[in-house]
Amino acid sequence: MPRDRRRVETDQRTHLSVVQERAILVGVALRGSGHDAAESLLELAALAESAGATIVHSVRQKRETIDPKFYIGKGKVDELADRVKSGKADVVIFDDDLSPAQLREIEEACGCKVIDRSELILDIFASRARTNESRLQVELAQLEYTAPRLRGMWTHLERIAGAGGGTGAGTVGGIGTRGPGERQIEIDRRIVSRRVTWLKRQIAQIDRRKIRQVRARHEHFNVSLVGYTNAGKSTLMNTLTDAGVRAEDRLFATLDTKTARWNLGDGLHALLSDTVGFLRRLPHHLVASFRATLEEAIHADLLLHVVDASSPAAWEQYQAVTQVLNDLGCGEHDTIVLLNKMDLVEDRSAMQMVQRRLPDAMAISARTGVGISNLVEAVRKLVSGPPRQVTLHTRTHDGKAISAIEKHAQVLERRYLDGAVDMDVVIGSRILKRLQVMHPHVRATEPER
Ligand SMILES: Nc1nc2c(ncn2[C@@H]2O[C@H](COP(=O)(O)OP(=O)(O)OP(=O)(O)O)[C@@H](O)[C@H]2O)c(=O)[nH]1
Ligand SMILES: [Mg+2]
């Protein structure tokens, strides 16, 4: 397996199985912080399991302030060390981001690897990245997060390297060591910064190509699926198109965008793109690196914001996604909110609360197809644009233009004169624009009275 190649060289072993790590999770509820630590810890558990860990224990602590040295305080760290021993844990995962010094102190006290929330998320992305584009994006995010922590993390890195660390994005030495951090022990930090510069240049090139690709589709109506990870975006993509994308019950199943034609009936269509999912407190380096991947959403004519209505945290997830969309500069885009997984909703009252706050949201199930025809109808209206009454002028021998007009418009009256035909029609304003792109000689004027 390529991801173990470096370890084999350093350890002189012939093969290594993928480590199924035993993890202890730690969450801190800071008084007045306003974030729900219990809910957040559940999400951390889902993330850790998505990364391949087995959770042996979760620790939650209420605090007034954080401890500068140990984050959770010396007493709690000692308790944690006992838990590590008794649970035979390999890794402790914190739900917050720790300083390099805190990581080192806690590792020392617990005698095992300690990683924080951002490192875990970056690690999941590293293990999921399949295309060259997403690999470069993840590596950049990892280097930018890790590099500033390098000085303080020297011993931390040495210890991981001693245990046989990985060699780059996509490599593995257990959770949190798939990053490029380990190989920097023996390398000058200047090399890291050179690599960062190189990665940024590569990504900028990809960005430019992507922007060209996205712009080339401007004559179509572009729709992007956005939403919290695991909300059902890819499942909906498969229901609406024959894209056949991967949909799975795990976080961040999709890292690469895919675009497919969505036939809306009666000759209308849109291009539909699946995108990477969002998460609360997503490391901002990751969002910055994945900007190109989110280019589809940035330039879309319409966003379909998919919400998992069966989740008790549906409203918080909706807000987290809205926040990231605002940060990306697409908060003002036309958006239809889709309350998905209606077939799973048990707690109607929680869902009704969301519906009261979002009265225009449409209830659907990507799995059973409930509500999909209403969605298609709503999108058809947007693709057509608001109806206008106009007079279209063309030649009687231009059968193609005439049949296109007859197909997409409601013809009220026609007048023939000297080989020309004038047609009074009602037509969607967007369809009219597209019709004129396809048939440039068709003129439109205000209706003759
Ligand atoms: N019961 C039910 N399950 C659904 C529905 N939509 C999606 N799912 C399930 O939810 C899980 C996640 O679905 P995906 O389509 O992979 O979610 P996603 O939003 O693409 O997730 P990421 O790519 O990880 O961001 C899968 O197990 C789907 O089968 C639905 O309407 N009903
Ligand atoms: Mg997906």
Image (cartoon, helix red, strand yellow):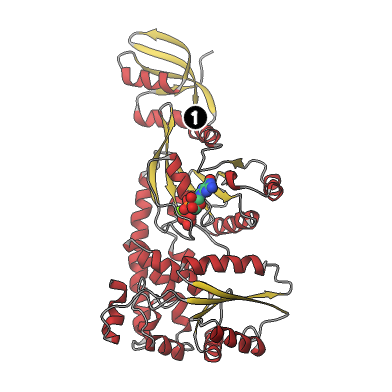
Q: Amino acid at mark 1?
A: Ser
Which of the two residues, 36 or 411, is positioned nearer the viewer here?
Answer: 36
**Circle 1 residue:** 429
Which residue is found at the position 38% from the left and 79% from the top? 193
Which of the two residues, 7 or 276, is positioned nearer the viewer here?
Answer: 7
313 to 139, vertically: above or below: above
Which residue is found at the position 49% from the left and 31% from the top? 384
33 to 381, vertically: above or below: below
Which residue is found at the position 35% from the left and 27% from the top? 439
Which residue is found at the position 49% from the left and 24% from the top? 427
**Mark 1, residues whose alpha carbon is within 10 Å: few (<14), some, or many (≥20)?**
some
Secondary-structure class at tag 1: helix
Which of the two residues, 311 or 195, is positioned nearer the viewer here?
Answer: 311
Q: How many marks?
A: 1
The quadrant in which the N terminus is found is bottom left
379 to 145, vertically: above or below: above
Horizontal side of residue 40 vs 282, given as left or right:
right
Horizontal side of residue 271 vs 375, given as left or right:
left
The quadrant in which the C terminus is found is top right
Residue 256, image x, y percentages: 39, 56
Residue 115, image x, y percentages: 51, 79
Residue 383, image x, y percentages: 48, 34
Does the rendering let one see residue 89? Answer: yes
Horizontal side of residue 314 vs 365, given as left or right:
right
Whether the residue under disc 1 has CB within 8 Å of ligand 1: no
Residue 89, image x, y percentages: 51, 81
